[in-house]
Image: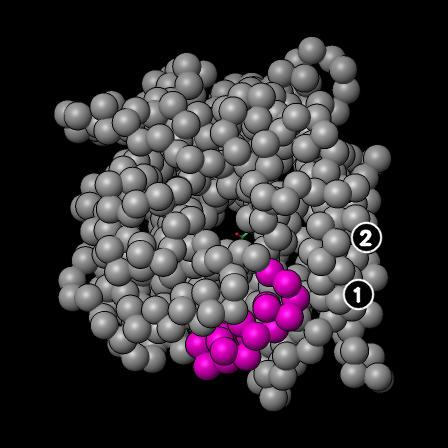
Amino acid sequence: MKFPDHFLWGASSSAFQIEGAWNEDGKGMTVADFNSFKKSDIQADSKTASDFYHHYKEDIAMMKELGLQVYRFSIAWARIIPDGDGEINEKGIAFYNDVIDELLKNGIQPFITLYHFDLPYALVEKYNGWESRKCADAFERYASVCFERFGDRVKLWQVHNEQNLMMRVDERMNLNEPDPHKKEQIRAQMDYHMFIAHAKAVNACHSIIEGGQIGCAVSSTVTYPLTNAPEDVWSAIQNNRFKTDYCLDMHAYGEYPGYYMAYLKEHDLVPQTCEGDDELLKSAKMDFIALNYYRTLTARYLPADEEHPKGTKVEGMNEVDYDMYGYWKIEKNTNLKASEYGAQIDPVGFRIVLNDYWNRYRLPLIVTENGLGTADELTEDGKIHDDYRIDYLQQHITAIGQAIEDGVDMMGYCPWSVMDLLSSHQGFRKRYGLIYINRTDMDLKDLQRIRKDSFFWYQKVIETKGESL
Ligand code: BG6
């Protein structure tokens, strides 16, 4: 299998998960810092993470050795504007200038995400972050600063990482409202403000950067019906729509699809809008769709009853995969193996998602996350023999090749993650990297960078443009 010459081979990371230096050189605290500090006594937090801030030259040299053509990473908004909407921090600008220049010097194209779960905490204190429309204005300003300062060298951009998933996680949105209905109203308003911010950033990118390309980054999946009973098939479709598709439709077409608007109306969740919003949302045309893919889901119909009215969430579930009465219930797929952390591994599902998005939106696709999180252990020879990760990546890259043969326009692939990093839930116990970082949750050790077996395997894949697969 040989991939086209224009196909970009890359790898990914995000600011709070690798940088460390959480309060150095003027950086402000972020929601991601705040949340990670809550668990500081039991697992790694964002204070040091992989210490990319102090190791970036060494890390970029390794990326070059790996053969990366593109590196997808994020900028910490609070490094550029520490309190979110005030003064610009020149030291933060200088850090990212250095990273960008170092990448270019090594022949690697920078691909920047503007916001990866790390809202400046000051905006939460000022007006509960995305609940206020002011947050969308602050984001537009921050995005414009990035485009103006870095756009001469950076042409590839992503707006929010996984708005559709972030929105479901109360901690990431700083959603503390005790009344369940009010909480859903605030969530819907926050979601809407993020769509407004997305549209403003897309338009700003196009007007500020010559040749700039920008897209969203969704958390993607496909939901299979548990049985072929029509109500189960419909439930599976609904699960996909409510957790992902409505978001992609909004990004691509600038309006909520009918089923979603009907749901918002039926449950008294319609957000407040402003004059001119419709035009703004429709005017913002993405250049590509970026997607993060880890696993698939399976669902069946979950009837509502008197005690559990239609549209109420089932309590006790994890927030990301919540069940909803009158809509769906998530079930285990017995045909699939799961990772040790429960993600159901499904390369065929990947091919389905890629075909589906291409058929619906006809926009080029780029994968900005895909990978296997495991508790890798250093062996006595000082190496990491991660054949399980090689197997995972091999199957998923093959699925991309098949999707290309199916006719899907694929721009590239950036597995998660270039190096071990702070996992969003399991600290440094769960590792995704091609490069091992020698630290544990509670012991920083020497932070040495060690190439895993998957590093050498991926290097060969890139070198041969997929022929070695
Ligand atoms: C994605 C996020 O949803 O999943 C990453 O964009 C995250 O930031 C990745 O690390 C894997 O999830 P986790 O919880 O295993 O770190």
The label number, if any, that marks residue 386 in the structure image: 1
Q: Which secondary structure, mark 1?
A: loop
Q: Nearer the viewer, residue 316 or 296?
A: 296
**Span colored in magenta:** 49-68
Residue at left offset 53%, top offset 72%: 60
Please provide percent x and percent y for residue 394. 78, 50
Please provide percent x and percent y for residue 37. 44, 71
Residue at left offset 16%, top offset 66%: 87
Residue at left offset 57%, top offset 28%: 357
Type of secondary structure dominating the magenta stretch: helix
Please provide percent x and percent y for residue 4. 66, 41
Q: Is residue 167 visible?
A: no
Q: Is 235 included in the stretch rendered in magenta?
A: no
Horizontal side of 191 relative to 386 (left or right) equals left
Could you classify mark 1 by the number of other residues whose Cα lies within 10 Å: few (under 14), some (14-19), or many (20 or more)?
some
Horizontal side of 216 relative to 129 (left or right) equals right
Residue at left offset 72%, top offset 45%: 397
Q: Amino acid at mark 1?
A: Asp
Q: Please determine whether, in this image, residue 67 is positioned above or below residue 204.
A: below
Mark nearer the viewer, 1 or 2: 2
Q: Quadrant of ligand 1?
A: bottom right
The label number, if any, that marks residue 23 in the structure image: none
Q: Which secondary structure, mark 2?
A: loop
User: Which residue extends farthest bottom?
Assistant: 446
Q: Is 58 included in the stretch rendered in magenta?
A: yes
Report which residue position mark 2 lands on.
468
Q: Quadrant of the N terminus?
A: top right
Q: Amino acid at mark 2?
A: Ser
